[in-house]
Image (tube, helix red, strand yellow):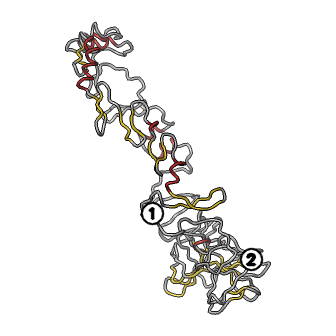
Amino acid sequence: MGEWKKVIVSGSQADLAAVTASIAIKVGSNQQIGTTQATTFLTGSFTGSFKGDGSNLSGVLATSLDIDTFGSDLTGITVVAADKLPLSDNGTEGRITVGQLATPLAGTGLEANSNTIRIAAAAAGSGLTGGAGSALAVGAGTHITVNADDVAVNTTTLIPAISGSIFGQVSGDVLINGAGVATIQANAVAISTDVSGLAAGVATFLATPSSANLISAVTDETGTGALVFATSPTLVTPALGTPSSATLTNATGLPIASGVSGLGTGVATFLATPSSANLISAITDETGTGTLVFSAGPTLTGTTNVAALAASGNVTIAGNLNVSGLISGSATYITSTNVAITDQFILLASGSTSTVDAGIIVQDAAGDGEAFYWENNVTGTSRWAIASAVSPTAVTVTAAEYMVSAKTAAGAPSGNPTYGGATNGYGNMYVNSSTSDIWIYA
């Protein structure tokens, strides 16, 4: 992305990113940047960084330490209790050993011992033993065995203990085995006597499922007879009512005059006898009279008024053509030695709702020429451009070069150029009207 860069001219104030010089550069009256250490001297206060070992600097007060660049990288070593760390003790700087951190770091359940941290004996609560240098251990109990790596439940003794007090009390139509699995015995449930909450007739239908028993159980049915399923049912004198949808692919005998409702006046007559006269009688907002017109070779009589006329071939007009609106098209040609236009402005790309490539072309070869045009830049802000070998039928053009625009305003430039923007505004100029300083966007 470009930026505004100041042009250095006589009397202007330079603003440079870097300066390369083969001799010393003087800054003011008492400072100099030379090509060697001996010829470089600076005084005053500075911010930033300097190269070198700093052995010749004086009056430098360090206020911070960059641990990422300090000393050597020791991430691969094994830290021991005797290793040292820097420490600031309320304004007094010094060093301590890693082992000295054991006491302040030991919290609840931990204790310091010989510069190390271990689990305290008090950390072993109910069901645990150990601590104070010994490993924590879990106590065993009835039906529980503590192994070296896990705690196991003895199901051989636990399940009989439970089943002896619970499962032994269960009998009847439900069988519970020693593993605690319950099974309803065969023929243990009678639908007519053992199931409650069924409506009248439902038990009879479940025992003997027939159309008659179903209609006896249902309380809000409509019609009588046998149960109907979707595929090829035979309905006896049904009243269909008003269906939400229906497909009449194989239906016949529907009279258009009386069997279809909602048609406009005269529409049924036109559908039965389609003629120009019957069509014009059915239409309520027609224009003109006569017969129906189709596209190929119609003969029109009288005066014809059209809002728009499109012709794919040539149109020859014997008299004068008076146009009150716009003449539009992909290419419009006026064959004349000289064209005099009284309008002060020429509108190109008329009717466009977005920016497009548009301009003028001066022919200098067969079929094309030099273009001066407004470029529709899809990756940035548009800008005036020029290009060669442009066809008069072109709708997009690739710019060869761009026109430079100059903006004048008080103060230094800010933001991107008005024409071309951040990605396409290179070469445009800006002039500070207060100081006459010049910038170029590059």
The one nearer the camera, 65 or 32, is: 65
**Picture coordinates of residue 66 (x, y %)?**
57, 66
Residue placed under numbered mark 1 in the picture: 75
Of helix, strand and loop, which one carries label 1? loop
The one nearer the camera, 39 or 296, is: 39
Could you tell me which residue is drawn at 56 percent across and 50 percent down? Answer: 287
The one nearer the camera, 148 or 255, is: 148
Rounded to the nearest angstrom, the CA distance separating label 2 from label 1 is 60 Å
The furthest residue to the left? 186
Could you tell me which residue is drawn at 56 percent across and 61 percent down? Answer: 95
Is residue 62 visible in this depiction of the protein? yes
Quarter occupied by residue 156? top left
Observer-side mark, 2 or 1, equals 1
The furthest residue to the bottom? 23
Picture disc at residue 299? none
Q: Quadrant of the N terminus?
A: bottom right
Q: Quadrant of the C terminus?
A: bottom right
Vertical order, 242 against 86 (above or below) = above
Is residue 343 visible in this depiction of the protein? no
Which amino acid type is marked by label 1?
Answer: Thr
The furthest residue to the top? 193
**Picture coordinates of residue 91 (x, y %)?**
66, 59
Residue placed under numbered mark 2 in the picture: 408
Which amino acid type is marked by label 2?
Answer: Thr
The furthest residue to the front? 114
**Picture coordinates of residue 330 (x, y %)?**
53, 70
